Amino acid sequence: MIRRYDAAPDAVWAAWTTESILRTWYSPLPDWIVGNATVDVRVGGGYRMTFGPEPEGDLYIEEGTYTVVDPITRLGWDSRLTGDGASEASRIDLTFTPDGDGTILDVVESGLSEDSVADHEMGWTGALDRLEELLSK
């Protein structure tokens, strides 16, 4: 997925790497919340997030290990999503490219089963829409 945001690359990067900011947007549905988010953004460091319906926001758990950390340029990680009958591993790679006063974000998720591609695409669409709302404020 490719999105353009009207925000500088450092602001888009911060949205992906700062726990308090991730909690405001990283969920696939508008009426869901991020219940918890912890990040240790370094190669070999990890992250763990829970998200789902209010009030707990813990229907799903996403956790993984960072494999690429090139500040404000690239971010990559191995991910596992579990919960509500799901168990899916994938690799996610983000590229942040300056574009005038904005940023082009390229999101590539690989390694998914064919059965889960549509669900993940829907999830990314929702989350990236919320990121756009956050960055446009």
Image (cartoon, grey):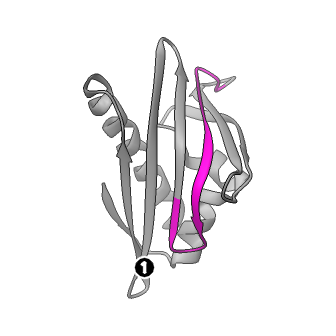
Residue 79: x and y in percent read: 53, 39
From this viewpoint, which residue is outermost toward the bottom? 100
Image quarter of residue 102: bottom left
Disc 1: which residue: 102
Residue 58 lies in the magenta stretch: yes
What residue is shown at x 61% (from left), y 52% (from top)? Answer: 66
Q: Work out whether residue 58 can be spotted.
A: yes
Residue 93: x and y in percent read: 44, 55
Q: Count neighbours of disc 1 (C-alpha within 10 A) and say few if under 14, some if 14 to 19, many if 20 or more.
A: some
Residue 98 left/right relative to 49: left
Whether 76 is drawn above or below 5: the answer is above
Q: Quadrant of the N terminus?
A: bottom left
Hey, what amino acid is under mark 1?
Gly
Q: Quadrant of the C terminus?
A: bottom right
What residue is shown at x 49% (from left), y 75% (from top)? Answer: 7
Image quarter of residue 63: top right
Residue 52: x and y in percent read: 57, 26
SS at badge 1: strand
Residue 8: x and y in percent read: 51, 79
What residue is shown at x 66% (from left), y 45% (from top)? Answer: 23
Chief secondary structure of the magenta portion = strand
Q: Work out whether residue 29 can be spotted.
A: no
Q: Nearer the viewer, residue 13 or 34?
A: 13
Q: Which residues are magenta?
A: 57-75
